[in-house]
Image: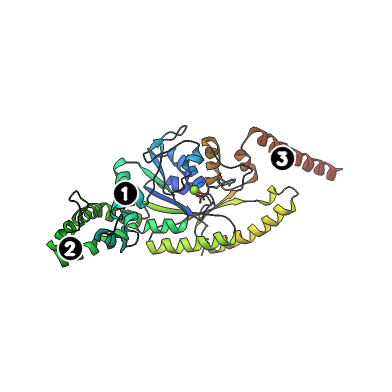
Amino acid sequence: MAEETPPDPTLSHLLDHSTLKWIFVGGKGGVGKTTTSSSLAVQLAAKRRSVLIISTDPAHNLSDAFRQKFTRHPTPVEGVDNLFAMEIDPTPEQTDLAELDSGPNFLSDLTSSIPGIDEAMSFAEVMRQVQSFDYECIVFDTAPTGHTLRLLQFPATLQKGLSKLMSLRGAFGGMLGQLTSMLGLTEDGNTTEGLLNKLDSLKNVVDEIGRQFRDPELTTFVCVCIPEFLSLYETERLVQELAKFEMDCSSIVINQIIFPEMTGSSRLLEARVRMQQRYLAQFDDLYEDFHLVKLPLLEEEVRGTDALLSFSKSLMRKYSAAASADLAQSSEDDLRQELQRLRQRCLELERQLASHK
Ligand SMILES: Nc1ncnc2c1ncn2[C@@H]1O[C@H](COP(=O)(O)OP(=O)(O)OP(=O)(O)O)[C@@H](O)[C@H]1O
Ligand SMILES: [Mg+2]
């Protein structure tokens, strides 16, 4: 039987997959989630009618990556057609549910008895809004892993909240209304009925989004990591958790790689290369049926639209030393690399010439 060819080591399959609507980008802290999601969004924007990138990390860094201030509302990204960005904060403080938590009341006990219900409702609201904006593709720059996994649980959390409240309403009937008014809760929606109605109205949108998240034609998750032990370990945990959510995950970006030709004569870098190569071999073994995208560590941070545009190209092609020349951040770096390449070429030609003599 013919050997199966491994999946192409780039993210170009995501650009070609025209039905994809939700793309999550996640991984451990500091590995390059924002850089990867922003770069991917820039590439998608060139192909799709409209793309929205959303940061769900309370420590927002889209604004830093693009060097442009973003808010809770979609804002066009300067210099990139069809791309919009927004930064949301799916924490309870942002919602009117926070009011329910203040003071010793019946409802606060209720909401706190379902862990994460407030965050889930807040995220559901955001998703309802995002659905209504009608973007063709939505890229999520997520917070580090634990937070992201909690976020993805939101349909299940809301479902649980809803059935708990329903059963309470069934058990207490009209008494619940009397009790809430006796406890001094107002009638402006800040009652059990109000909460129930709110949960109920979100139910349809949440069910629909939950269904879409499990459909590989609509949703995929891109894991970002670096070739180090903790990151390899966390990637495996993430891949397993995503499988439990039944969310497609077929791409892993391994960022900040020092390729052997990058070491110059630094022994420190050579040692790092050896260490990284060990983990890269493990990634290759463990994830042979994934799109494994290997990105070089650059000398500079990746900040600003130009840097992202340049970096984003490396998501779409296999790394090669020659291609990496494009990634140089400044013309000075460009010239240095070009000079180095020409010097090496001269040495090669001299060697060839010598062997002819
Ligand atoms: N391949 C790379 N070469 C050089 N710098 C990089 C590379 N990838 C990312 N960076 C830089 O590393 C820093 C962290 O990257 P980034 O913000 O994308 O990580 P993150 O996973 O989103 O972090 P956080 O968990 O804090 O949100 C940024 O300053 C970014 O510009
Ligand atoms: Mg980030």
- Identify which amino acid the numbered label 3 is placed on: Arg
Q: Is mark 2 on a helix, strand or loop?
A: helix
Q: Residue at 75% of width from left, 42% of height from top? A: 344
Q: Could you say where residue 15 lies in the image, as x and y percent from the top left? A: 44, 45
Examine the rendering and report whether any part of residue 20 can be seen. Answer: no
Choose the circle earlier in sequence order: 3 or 2. 2
User: What's the distance in space between the residues labelled 3 and 2, CA to CA?
Assistant: 74 Å
Q: Residue at x 60, y 38 (%)?
A: 326
Q: How far apart are marks 2 and 1 (CA)?
A: 24 Å
Up-down: is 17 above or below 196? Answer: above
Cβ of disc 2 within 8 Å of ligand 1?
no
Q: What residue type is labelled 1?
A: Thr
Q: Is mark 1 on a helix, strand or loop?
A: loop
Which residue extends farthest bottom? Answer: 171
- Residue position marked by numbered label 1 in the rendering: 95
Q: Residue 169 carries which label?
A: 2
Residue 341 image label: 3
- Closer to viewer: mark 3 or mark 1: 1
Residue 142 located left or right of residue 172: right
- Residue appearing at x 30%, y 44% in the figure: 129
Residue 300: x and y, percent? Answer: 61, 42
> In this rendering, would 340 be left or right of 303?
right
Point out the tag, 2 or 1, that comes first from the N-terminus.
1
* Few, some or many residues within 10 Å of mark 2 (<14, 14–19, 20+): some
Q: Is residue 337 visible?
A: yes
Picture disc at residue 128:
none
- Crowding at dot 3, Cα within 10 Å, few <14 / some 14-19 / many 20+, comes out as some
Of residues 308 and 44, the one drawn nearer to the viewer in this rendering = 308
Q: Give the residue drawn at x 48%, y 63%.
A: 237
